[in-house]
Amino acid sequence: MVFGGCLKRGFAALVLLLCLAPPAAAQLNEQLSAYTGANATGYLQPLADAIGANLNAGIFRTASIPRMAPKIRIELEVMSVFFGDDDRTFRAVTERGFTPVQYADAPTAVGSTEAVIVEGDAGTAFAFPGGLDLNSFALAAPQIRVGGLFGTELIVRYYAMNISESESEDSSDDNLGDISLFGIGAKHSISQYLPAPFPVDLSAGFFWQTFDVGENDRGDRLISSKALSIGVQASKMVVRFVEPYAGLSYDTHTLDVSYDSEEDGVTTTNDIDFEKDSTLHLTLGLMLEFPVAKGFIEYNVAGMNSFSFGIALGM
Amino acid sequence: MNATLKKTGLLLVMTGLILVAAGGCIMEDRVIEIVVSETTCIDFPEYHTSSTFVTPATVDYAEQINEILMDNDLSRDDIVSARLVSASYGVTDFPAHADWAITGAVTVQREDVSDGPDTLYAYTTLSVADALGKTLPAVLNAAGVGVLNRALADFIAGENPVLTFEVTNSGVAPAPSVDDPLVFEWNGCIVIDIVAKSEAEVPDPF
């Protein structure tokens, strides 16, 4: 019984690692219903930036790719950002016919859990909802890397799952929605075209991803996101099994949110398309390349800084 | 070297296991102040042969708020505060007829305790035809807002407020008559913000 509980807990933890986003998304759907338009954009902006930063982290890593030798790895990685003080509030404006129109520093989705209330005409008041008080936001991704054909490797990320808040399999009331991630890209060795011995390995690659999470009141996707990274990488094995690496890439990220809110007794669908975010992205990392087990840790300097770490098994 | 390799491999696997074991630390409990915004509308069907008339509508406010709370999986104990945000009105039905201009006020009073009546908002020479299908913002009066806010506070304290809204009309141009009655339907809506505590588990792993 106890072992069963441990297994259940272990499995739940694994699911959490892979699916950190849906519970937050479900709570966000509740919070967002108090907002329309510009306020919803400001409220979600730090989370949108975090999703973009996480998606474009931990992709390429080292530049060494064998020209003609089989390479296959199964990888699990965690990407995360830390939120700063600037991410915790946004300039919000009153809605719902409240007079006079007022501006306030209200919590973003990652800000304080406490609502902010402003006073209006004749004893009225307007309330801005609290946030989720997050220090960090992480995503996990299983990934497979296959390569060694003409100095090229293919990278694929994928998982899809329906997450339920309830432990009961029969319950469908607490459905937090689906989460799905698909990413595909390739990396090609540049070193093979350079005269040997070149001091470092060089490669270039691209990676495209789509990430959907959560469910709105209509049963549609709450958050849909797309990311693309194109970049070059350099690495060198300085001592046996230890390979520092660096990368420079150009990242883009788009995010759409669709949720329902009520105004004047009428439920309206709000579709928010965040502006396409483009940023230069510097990666500094360290890879431990043991014969079967590998590990890596990296720091990413971009529009929003992030870190990533993970393990890999394979050749 | 083999021993080192084994140790390192074991370390990597352990890293994964620690991540899995740390599942309990990935999710953090939070008590979040959510805002439930609700619009309550009251219909006033009007059929009058004189310029001065009163049209009352009684609302079981406690029942309405309880429904709002139930829809949002909240209870009365979860409420931190509740206040009036705004009010509006508009004509919903106006059978074909030459326009009328009406003047008057909407008052509010408690039925369960003695509070009010007080004016919530007034309307002056309002064109019935122009107001058809529109949502007109009401310029609120502090005394009427006070009745509503006190009702909300009493609800949080455990009471069950019942409110009566009254259209108290003082003038119609042109004047209606038995042969030419004033006939239209309109509604008044109030928007309230309920701030409530909601417990949630959120992912915050680092």
Image (cartoon, rainbow, N blue to C red):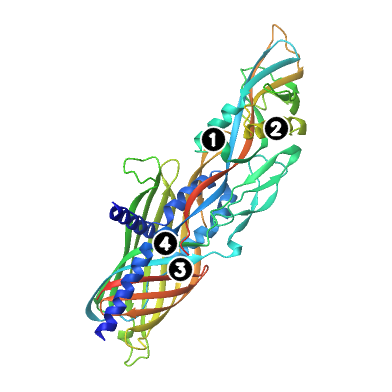
Judged by depth in the image, the label closer to the viewer, 3 or 1, is 1
Q: CA distance from mark 4 to mark 1?
A: 33 Å
Q: Amino acid at mark 4?
A: Leu
* Amino acid on which the number 2 mark rests in the picture: Arg
Point out residue B111 in the picture as x, y percentages from the top left corner.
Answer: 68, 21
Horizontally, residue B5 falls left or right of residue A216, namely left
Mark 4–mark 2 Cα distance, whole angstroms, equals 46 Å
Q: Badge 2 is on which residue?
A: B150
Chain letter of disc 1? B
Whether labels 4 and 3 belong to a single chain: the reply is: yes
Q: Which residue is mark 4?
A: A139
Name the secondary structure under disc 2: helix
Residue at (29% x, 83% y) in the render: B4
Task: Tell me if I can see residue A186 in this picture.
Answer: no
Residue identifier under label 1: B69
Which residue extends farthest bottom? A197
Q: Chain of mark 4?
A: A
Name the kind of residue labelled 1 in the image. Leu
